[in-house]
Amino acid sequence: MPAETIDVIVTSPPYNIGLSYRTYADRREEEDYLDWMMEVAASLRRVMRPDGSFFLNISGSSAQPWLPFELVVRMRELFVLQNHITWVKSISVGEESFGHFKPMNSQRYLHRGHEHLLHFTLDGDVLLDRLNAGVPYQDKSNIARRGHRQDRRCRGDTWFIPYETVRGRSEKFDHPGTFPVALPEQCIRLHGRKKAKVLDPFMGTGTTLLAAQRMGCSGVGIDIDEDYVAIARRRLVEDWLDKTDQ
């Protein structure tokens, strides 16, 4: 790919925690995994525009909590960590629960209700469209009292984006690591460039490309699994046809 041509990268690589992919063994030696991810990161840095954003969704497991942090420390060689967003997938507020709580059988660990969404840039000074990815004020008096021009404020660095309810892997296209379309949509909104060129080097079933298409952006997706690529193409075509029928 040509250098400095990508505006936004949104991706979720294998976490190296033993997930069941079709064509990839998600259980490398830790040093091997980290070295491999640094090779990937160097390639991503090359294709990013100087004012580009790289959103990396990653998580460890209860038994392997250090791996994401080890990777982040290494990536200081290539990027600036401009924002660290916590993607909340499930949460309990008082006596009420929201989102999907994956069963946890261990008596040692708490339920894992969040993942990391790391916003990397080349120099740490990329201007963002925080209101484009923002939310309305709960207390409308804040609009005039604080001198705001619109009913919109920054979403902050904690994003509650739950999965849609599914009852089996087939509803996730038989992929073990999908994320909701709303996650890459928010990343693209936050970066704030019209008709951005979006890249997902671990495309899976094409969720990032689907988000890009819906937002009027162009997308490039890469995956080693031909079945997932076929699913991604089908999802994009079906979504496009649904849009043109409306």
Image: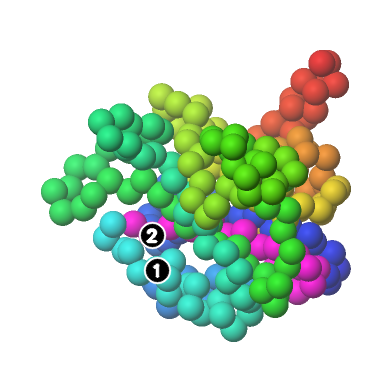
Q: Residues within 10 Å of mark 1 (few under 14, many from 20)?
A: some
* Direction from residue 240 to residue 28 in the image, left or right: left
Residue at image point 83% right, 16% down: 245
Vertical placement of residue 83 versus 115, above or below: below
Question: Residue farthest to the left?
Answer: 107
| Region rendered in magenta | 43-61
Q: Which of the two residues, 153 or 149, is positioned nearer the viewer here?
A: 149
Q: Is residue 41 magenta?
A: no
Which residue type carries mark 2?
Answer: Gly
For disc 1, the marked residue is 67
Location of residue 143 (image quadrant): top right
On-image quarter of the N terminus: bottom right
Which residue type carries mark 1?
Answer: Leu
Across and down, in percent, residue 108 comes to: 15, 54
For disc 2, the marked residue is 60
Question: Residue farthest to the bottom?
Answer: 77
Residue at image point 72% right, 58% down: 128
* Direction from residue 211 to residue 2 in the image, left or right: right
Whether pointer 1 and pointer 2 mark residues with C-beta atoms closer than 8 Å, the reply is yes
Question: Residue farthest to the front?
Answer: 145
